[in-house]
Structure formats: C-alpha cells, structure tokens
Amino acid sequence: MTDDGIGYADRASSIDPAMGEYADEFLANIEALPTYRSTVGCVIPAYNEEDAIADVLDSLLAQTRLPDAIHVIVNNTTDATVEIASHFAGLHIRGEGAEEQMTEIFVHDIGENPDKKVGALNYGYTLVEGMDFFLGVDGDTTADPHAIEYLVREIEDDERIGGISAIYSIDDSGLDTLMSKFLIAGQRAQFAAFNMQNLLRGRNMAVLGGQYSIFSTTALRAVVKQTHQRYPWVRDSEIEDSLLSLEIKSAGYLTKISAHARANVGGMTTLQSLDAQQVKWNTGAIDLMWPGQRGDTKGQPLHPNLRLRWFENISMVTNGFTRLGFFFLVITSLMLNAFVFVILWIVPTIMAMLLNLRTAHAMHNANKRDYLFAVLFFPAEIYMWIRLGHFARSWTKFASSSQTDNWALQAKAESGGGGYAHFAPIAVVAIVLSGAVAIWAQLPTVLQSDVLFVGWTVLGIITILQTAWMALKLLKRHKGFKA
C-alpha cells in the first residue's frame, strides 16, 4: 500500500494491465508461502501405567495442536503398558488441506533401567533434541484439548522462557472410598494454593513439574553445556524436576507457569502413597535448599527458585508449633484449673476457613466437595496435620542422612505396600506432648503458672501474626487467574 492509500497492484494495473496481473500473481504467491511451524517432540516416561496410558495418548491425540512426534518410553514395567501403548503406535493424521495435522507415536521398551524416570526422560531427549520444544508428559496425566496450543504459543512469545508448566489439578471423579475422596480433595486444594501463589508472582514457576511441561531444547542444551552433563536430567536429586528448573534459571532462562494450559495429574488415594510421594518431594527440596555439598548435590539456599520453598518450610514450622503449643497449653491449663475460653480464639479459625473457601472458589473446576472441604474446617485441619507428618518425616530423613530409594518406596506404596511409617509422626507427637506435660507437672505451682503465662502470651502473638498474614492473603487480588 502506498502513502496515498492506493495498492501496488492497482497502481501497476493503471499503468500496464499486464503488470497488474503480474503483481496480483506475485502477491498471491507471497501469501501462499508456508509459515514456519515450530516442532514439538513429546516424551512420556511410563512405568506400570496400564490403567492410564490409553487415556494419556487419547488426550494427546485430541489436542488442537498435535505434537510432531510422541515417544512412549516404557521402563522397568511389569504390567501391560507396552501392549496397550502399542495399539496407538504409528502415524495419525487429522484434518484436510491447510488444517491437516499429523503426529507419529513410537513405543520404546527400554527394559530394566536403573535411572528409572530420569533415564526414560534422557532417552526420550536424545530422540527429540533436534526439535524446537520438548514436551514432557507423565504416564498418568491428561490435559485440556488446548493445552499444547497454549504452551507452544506462550513459550514462542518470549525467547527468554526456558520452560513452562501447565496449571495442575487432579480429577476427583470415580472415587469410591471416603478416604480417597478426602485425600484427593486435600491435594486439589494444595495444588490450587500452590498454583495461585505462582500465578500471582508474575507467573514465575519455581518447579517445572514433569507431569505436563514444555521446554525449549535450546535451553536444555544450554543446561547440558553449563553443567557439563551428558543429559538435562540427573539423579542427583529426589526431585529431578526441581533441579532441572534451577539449572534452567541459572542458565539465564525464565521458568513460568502457563496462564491457560491445564492438566490433570494422577492423585494419591491412600495415606501410604501420599506419604511416600510427599516425603520424596520434601526431602529432595530440603536437599537443594540446605547449604553444603552432599555427594554430587550442592545446596543452593539463595537460589531465587528456592525462596518459595524456604517460605513453605518456615510456614510449616510455624503451623506445627502453634498446634502443638495450643494442645500443650490447653492440657496443662485444665490440669491447673486455669483454663478460660476466649471468644477471640475463633477469629483465626474463621480466617482460615475463609482463606480455604477463597482457594476453592479460585479453582477452575471447583465442585461441591471442594467447597465442603473448605467450609467444614476439620477436613482441611486434618489434612494439615497429615502434611505436618510428611514435613517432619522429610526433615528427619535429611538430618539422619539415611540412604533410601524414595522412588522405590513411592512405587511400592502406590501398589499397596509401604508399611506403616506414615503413622510414626502420630506416635512422636503423643510422646513429645506426654513428655512435656510430665515435665511441667513436676514443676512448682508458681513456676507452672509462669510457664502458662509466657506460653499463652507467645502463642497469642504468633497467632495474631498468622491471622494478619491470612487476612492479607485473603484481600490479595487474584487478577482474573483461575487455579
């Protein structure tokens, strides 16, 4: 278009009809030139996923933006994962003409693999490292049909981004026991709170969870070069996703959470499996947070991706202290006939319920069970005690430097084994409270009163600060985000 608003083809036609026809043809050819389409290689590490792998592959084939290749990396499996996945192997074509998309599914059984999920991811990386993006999908994770389209659009929009994680939740349909419904409701609330926290921090994501995340292969190659590794993922950490996220950030890239892409991950439906998963995650996080060199893992306490981890741990310490302190003070006050109920104690409880309710309301697909979990108070409180148990067991494992294969323990727990280690924190709490009360009972009455006075005062101050913090979170705008 020229400055006077007349098109080049029109002006050429007014001068020479043949020239006008040539101009029309030339512009049509320009418009017909294909635009560059980024390539996406999807890798699915699969271990004993016979119940879920078909749904995962169906979900990928239903995406509005198909990956260019899908590699199912089956490892250490003892079930029918390979057989079921093999039914999907081959070329899949959808649409016609300009709308045509195609992908090819490959199934690789790499047999016994000592590096487990990490080994499967690295094997998959060697297959797709020549593509623009690496999409990691867990063998039990399904996504919204637009998830890959959103992830690709967001990571293409900013070359500084090294990886983007989907917004995670858990599908709570088809649950048949009260315990599974309770645990999944707790995990959904936990995911929602974590997601919203990251969305409101400029969408900066500390951990690019391997459940459904897309990575720039340029960023992954930069990590390999900077860390002198052969592959992006290493077994130096119990949480390989967190370590890789730290390394991507250290290589100068951003790690983000998507504003729109959503995925449902596999939830833990028993206390044993939830305990094994959370202890593995927490122990790995502590290992990355704590200063000093432990084997090949160096703690990075000041790394920007770990600030949220520090806050979570400080928050758990505070929650544990206030709850144990409250029980101790109530018991000892009753023993001394000095217990007086104060109506203001209800305020923190109400504030916690309102905060839980707002978290439920912020969920993209909140249902009646999510709201009941929030407003009934006791389910959320019981779940907090369960999380405190995971927290205590994780720090105990780290402090004892015990060498255990937490991957194997989680797999065993998910298959129905795992013993009763998750009940250990209950016994510890009972012993600690009993011991503290017994020691207090041996003190002179005047000293007992002093202990109660100081204890209630300290607990009151901490509770006021906690309540104020909850109020600030309650008043914080969600900026239109849905967790």
Image: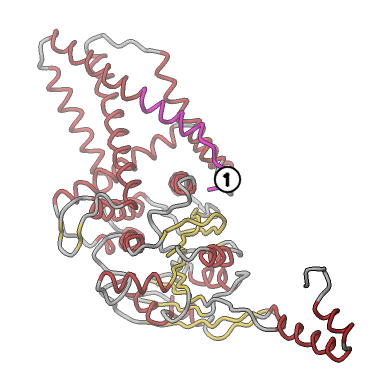
Q: Position of residue 240 (x, y in %)?
A: 31, 63
Is residue 478 inside the magenta stretch?
yes
- How many numbered marks have been drawn onto this rendered protein structure? 1
Q: Is residue 275 visible?
A: yes
Identify the secondary structure beneath mark 1.
loop
In percent of the image, x 56 and y 47: which residue is there?
A: 482
Note whether 120 is above or below 323 in the view shown: below
In percent of the image, x 47 and y 68: which residue is there?
A: 51
Q: Nearer the viewer, residue 406 or 78?
A: 406
Q: Which residues are magenta?
A: 464-483
- Report the quarter where the N terminus lies: bottom right
Note whether 414 is above or below 398 in the view shown: below
Q: Nearer the viewer, residue 386 or 5?
A: 5
In percent of the image, x 32 and y 37: which residue is there?
A: 315
- The image quadrant of residue 248 is bottom left
Q: Position of residue 88 (x, y in %)?
A: 54, 80
- The image quadrant of residue 256 is bottom left
Q: What's the coloring here?
A: secondary structure
Q: Main secondary structure of the magenta part?
A: helix
For disc 1, the neighbor class at 10 Å (few under 14, some 14 to 19, many from 20) is some
Q: Position of residue 31 (x, y in %)?
A: 72, 80
Disc 1: which residue: 366
Q: Position of residue 24 (x, y in %)?
A: 81, 84
Q: Nearer the viewer, residue 339 or 65?
A: 65
For this view, does 73 lie left or right of residue 366?
left
- The image quadrant of residue 428 is top left
Note whether 425 is above or below 284 in the view shown: above
Give the amino acid type for the residue marked by disc 1 in the picture: Ala
Is residue 217 inside the magenta stretch?
no
